[in-house]
Amino acid sequence: MFLNFKIQGEGQPLLLIHGLFGSLDNLGGLARVLADHYKVYQIDLPNHGQSPRSDDVTYPSQASAVKDFITQQGLNHVSVVGHSMGGKVAMAFAMANPDLVDQLVVMDIAPVQYRVRRHDAVLAGLNATMQTPIANRKEAEQTLSQHVKEPGVRQFLLKSLAKQDDGHFNWRFNVAALEANYDDITDWPLNGVFDKKTLFLKGADSDYIAAEHRDSIERQFPQAKAHVVAGTGHWLHAEKPDTVARVITRFLTKSER
């Protein structure tokens, strides 16, 4: 599989992995800051952006796609930063390929199964927009708003709405595959260990990383450290990109010594 990607900056290689319903552009603000210190690789995960589609969204499968990308780029080591679902992909990749990963940063997700379905309203809204061809962004947002009440979430989704050759719009993520395999996305079937420096970044106002997840984190990532970013929720990198980039850079720099 050949993933769509973007590269900027010079230095040691650093891979950024976006979350569910996202694309490489969602980490663009963070990438621009980190590119002052690293050669930053941004990828579209399978079923997202301009990367290939697949009916297999399990974490071993997505981690395998990331490994293919690393091999294609001729890299023999990389530090990895992943957000939300991308954080799980990053953890799965690190567990399966510890020799390729120097350091790992996981943003606002834990290595656990999430039993609460957080995206049913989003999926309902996306499906509603596809009942008829989407004529424009305003129409798509109006339909989404009947299901997705948070304006920020709607704007996040609309970043992946693209105009097609026929003049209509469509989503750049594979709604059907993501919905059909949603349980694989909320799951965490792995029991491996990544015994290298790992940073878990938590948005202070987010509940994706909770106290009850600590044992799972420490068991699977015995060198894990945690940092809470004040005044941010689940999209901490978008809310405070400079702060998050500074924390990541400080962590990576200390780990490289």
Image (tube, rainbow, N blue to C red):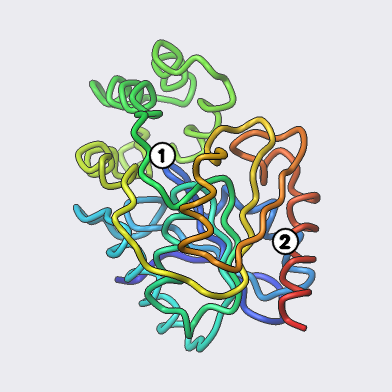
How many numbered marks does the figure carry?
2
Determine whether the residue tagged by mark 1 lies in a helix, strand or loop.
strand
x and y percent of residue 83 in the render?
54, 51
**Given the image, on which type of amino acid does mark 1 rest?**
Lys
**Given the image, on which type of amino acid does mark 2 rest?**
Ile
Q: Residue at x 54, y 84 (%)?
A: 77
* Disc ID at residue 196: none
What residue sits right under mark 2 in the picture?
A: 248
Q: Quadrant of residue 162?
A: top left
Along the line of sight, the residue nearer the viewer: 222 or 186: 222
Q: Give the left or right position of residue 178, taking residue 3 as reference.
A: left
Q: Give the left or right position of residue 129, taking residue 239 as reference.
A: left
Can residue 41 be seen here? The reply is no
Instruction: Count residues near mark 2 (Cα–Cα under 10 Å), then give few for <14, some for 14-19, many for 20+.
Output: many
Q: Residue at x 55, y 38 (%)?
A: 210
What residue sits right under mark 1 in the picture?
A: 163
Q: Residue at x 38, y 38 (%)?
A: 114
